[in-house]
Amino acid sequence: MARWSYPRPLSSEITPRSAWLSRRRFVAAVSSAAVGGLAGHAQADALRTRPGPFQAKETPTSLADVTHYNNFYEFGMDKSDPSTYSAAFRPRPWTVTVDGLVSRPRVWDIDDLMAAMPIEERLYRMRCVEAWSMVIPWDGFPLATLLQQAEPLGNARYVAFESVLRPEQMPGQRTGLDSLQWPYVEGLRLDEAMHPLTLLAVGLYGQTLPTQNGAPIRLVVPWKYGFKGIKSIVRIRLVEKMPPTTWNRMNAAEYGFFANVNPDVDHPRWSQASERIIGAGGFFGGGRKKTLMFNGYGEQVAGLYDNMNLRTSY
């Protein structure tokens, strides 16, 4: 397997371990005492994690912002809707099916899956296609680890993801955007899915995922726009042809299949050259910064696209 490098911050840029641990203890205490106010409606459980690679150097976005400023259209269109309207959603019991062009298809119970995988803490930048950003301490495991257990067949070229369909628990699936088809679906090329950066997250800030952040399991691909990070996954399927994806199916001119962060390719209705930092200068974020190609992960992933025109394959 290829050896992957990753950004290493200067020693002066690293948050002291004592400060980080104090922050984590504070988060755990607040979540236990007032989980409904910060981390969602379902009780959050502490996770056993280990430090992982690819740590962003920026300060993490606050737990309050991460859990109260969300796009999760299954619960509504406003940023506050997921935290407000996800009370009825139940992330247990839950299964994830891994099938398609694999030698060893399997239906995983979510708790068995979490027990079988090495849960790592990874601090990733997150860039939304709407030109805002966060830095989130996810807890999860590489998607490649799960796919390797399934043993992809030689003709597998893509990985298709499907989210849960529960209109009785997800009001946005009943009254949301008419142009979106449910369930939410996404896809990656197999080499993208197997890249070490690609994560299946089961927690954040050291605790299980809140409902508004995609409980109990979601995809995180930090060099792509956030809409690629499908939430509440129920099926992962290996296929030969490029699978449909929700936003591309809704408007292919605005939302390409690849969705790589690219400051040189604007959305038809706004610039992608810079981004608003959530949590900087108030709850809605007052600071801005220049957007980096591949969201700053070019050293790791640019080689995946050597022979592609990223203006047309956007």
Image (spheres, rainbow, N blue to C red):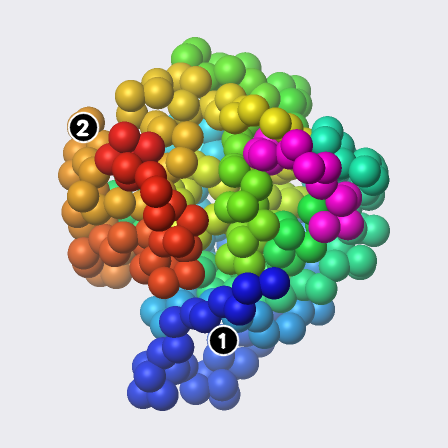
Residue hosting label 2: 269
Q: Are marks 1 and 2 in contact (CB under 8 Å)?
A: no
- From the top left corner, tell me how far across and down residue 116 is, in percent: 80, 58
Q: Earlier in the sequence, mark 1 or mark 2?
A: 1
Left or right of residue 164: residue 261 = left
Query: Residue drawn 40% across and 81% down?
Result: 15
Q: Residues within 10 Å of mark 1 (few under 14, many from 20)?
A: few
Q: Is residue 17 magenta?
A: no
Q: Against 173, is 302 above or below?
A: below
Secondary structure beneath disc 2? loop
Residue hosting label 1: 23
Give the Cα distance between marks 1 and 2: 39 Å
- From the top left corner, tell me how far across and down residue 149 is, in percent: 77, 50
Query: Residue drawn 19% across and 27% down?
Result: 268
Q: Could you tell me if residue 32 is visible in this image?
A: no
Q: Could you tell me if residue 197 is visible in this image?
A: yes
- From the top left corner, tell me how far across and down residue 86 is, in percent: 57, 35
Numbered range of the magenta stretch: 148-162
Q: Residues within 10 Å of mark 2 (few under 14, many from 20)?
A: few
